Amino acid sequence: IKDAPWGGHGLGTFGLQFPLYQGKAFSQVWALSFIPNASFTSYAHNDYLQLWAEVGLVGLIAFGALVWILLKRGRALADDPVALGCWAVLISLLVNAAVAFPLQLPTTLMLFAVLLGAVEGAACNKTIVLSLSAAPVRISIWILAVIICLTAYRSSYHRLAADAALWRASAALEGHHWGEAEKAIRTAIDHAPTRLDGYCMLGRLQVEQGEYDRALTTLDQAMRLGFDTEVFDWKATALERSGRRAAAVATLNELAWLRPDLNWPRQRLSALNREDENHEGDKR
């Protein structure tokens, strides 16, 4: 937020930026005691802070205006128990958003939109005389709610389809059924082209098939989409097997810097160093 307070880093980029900032934090002396508790998260566990980090203060103010309008609706719904109950659920979701990320989940976002439409419809009946001037406002609100619901539903469907395809791909990889695995992975990527899971699994498949150059291209694409320790693992493996040991060491060093709590990157680096030392000894 400090680096981009007004415009943010871009919607949906929190997970891409988090590892870099965590790595910088853990490089400080004061943070050494926190390293055992290090982890990676795609969300800030606070929707308001995440919104500020991604779209800047302007976007946060716009969302704050929506929250203020919603808070004011409670008074108009005092004699409508059903609508007031919907309003209370919305308020509870907004409170929960301060310590979690309910609005980042498609199904919860769809629920939020449905309840928002119900509350706004009930509030309009209480506060606005049904006239031609009020009709466009109500219609606009309902259209917006329907659009949000349909968008969230479509996102949920594609997420579910991608997860099912990746599950099939994982089973096929374990059984060394390469053709079946690649077909399932391609299906997952078609449904969720902006998720790194599919590219990570495709890179693994290509490494196990010995297609190291293709694997590196695929794994670099995964890195552009997000952060996953497995991507670094398979990239280092592809580089090592293709004879580019210096690049493999650099990849593992980068991961060790980003995630100092992990032991296996340092263990692999030590193994590579021992192999290099033994190789030099054999030459002598």
Image (cartoon, rainbow, N blue to C red):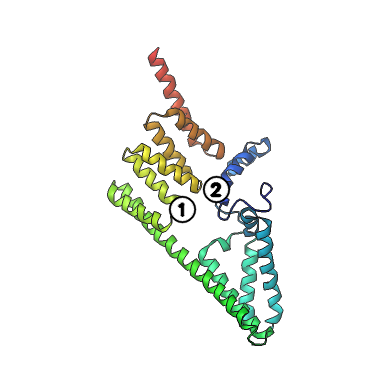
Could you tell me residue 37's position as x and y percent? 59, 44
Q: Which quadrant of the figure has residue 141?
A: bottom right
What percent of the width, then of the height, locates residue 231? 45, 43
Q: How many marks?
A: 2
Q: Which of disc 1 and disc 2 is earlier in sequence?
A: 2
Q: Nearer the viewer, residue 179 or 7?
A: 7
Q: Residue 16 has which mark?
A: 2
Q: Is residue 17 left or right of residue 204?
A: right
Q: Is residue 116 visible?
A: yes
Q: Which of 127 and 236 lies nearest the eye of the viewer? A: 127
What residue is shown at x 38% (from left), y 54% (from top)?
166
Measured as percent of width and height from the top left, residue 209 is found at: 31, 40
The crowding category of the residue bearing disc 2, from other C-alpha atoms within 10 Å (few below 14, some 14 to 19, many at least 20), is: some
What secondary structure is found at the residue carrying circle 2? helix
Q: Position of residue 182 (x, y in %)?
A: 32, 50
Three-letter code, disc 2: Leu
